[in-house]
Image (cartoon, grey):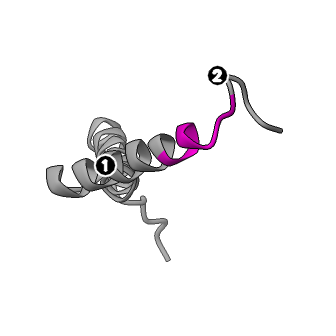
Amino acid sequence: MGAYMADVVNLKRFKKRAEREAAAKLADANRTRFGRTKSQRALDDHHVSRANQLLDQHKIGGEDAS
């Protein structure tokens, strides 16, 4: 019938673990957002520049036709 004490928790370890978990979540989000290869980025740049060239070909007199 004795009262038992709870386990002792090291707050420094708890804070470090929480910071590591938060950093891991942020890293995972950044990997999905920015994790593309150089060739994928180059291909996207090529598509954008090609689309801009095609759009510029349809301009009349240096101004937009619309």
Is residue 61 left or right of 14 when viewed as pictured?
A: right
Residue 12 lies in the magenta stretch:
no
* Foreground residue among 19 and 43: 43
- Residue at which label 2 appears: 62
Q: Nearer the viewer, residue 21 or 60?
A: 60
Q: Tag 2: residue type? A: Gly
| One can see residue 40 in this view | yes
Residue range in magenta is 54-60
Disc marking residue 8: none
Q: Magenta includes 58?
A: yes
Across and down, in percent, residue 15 comes to 36, 39
Residue at the front extreme of this rendering? 61
- Residue that sits furthest to the left in the current view: 38
The kind of residue tagged 1 is His
Residue, far top: 62
- Residue at 49% in and 41% down: 52
Which callout, 1 or 2, points at the residue further toward the start of the chain?
1
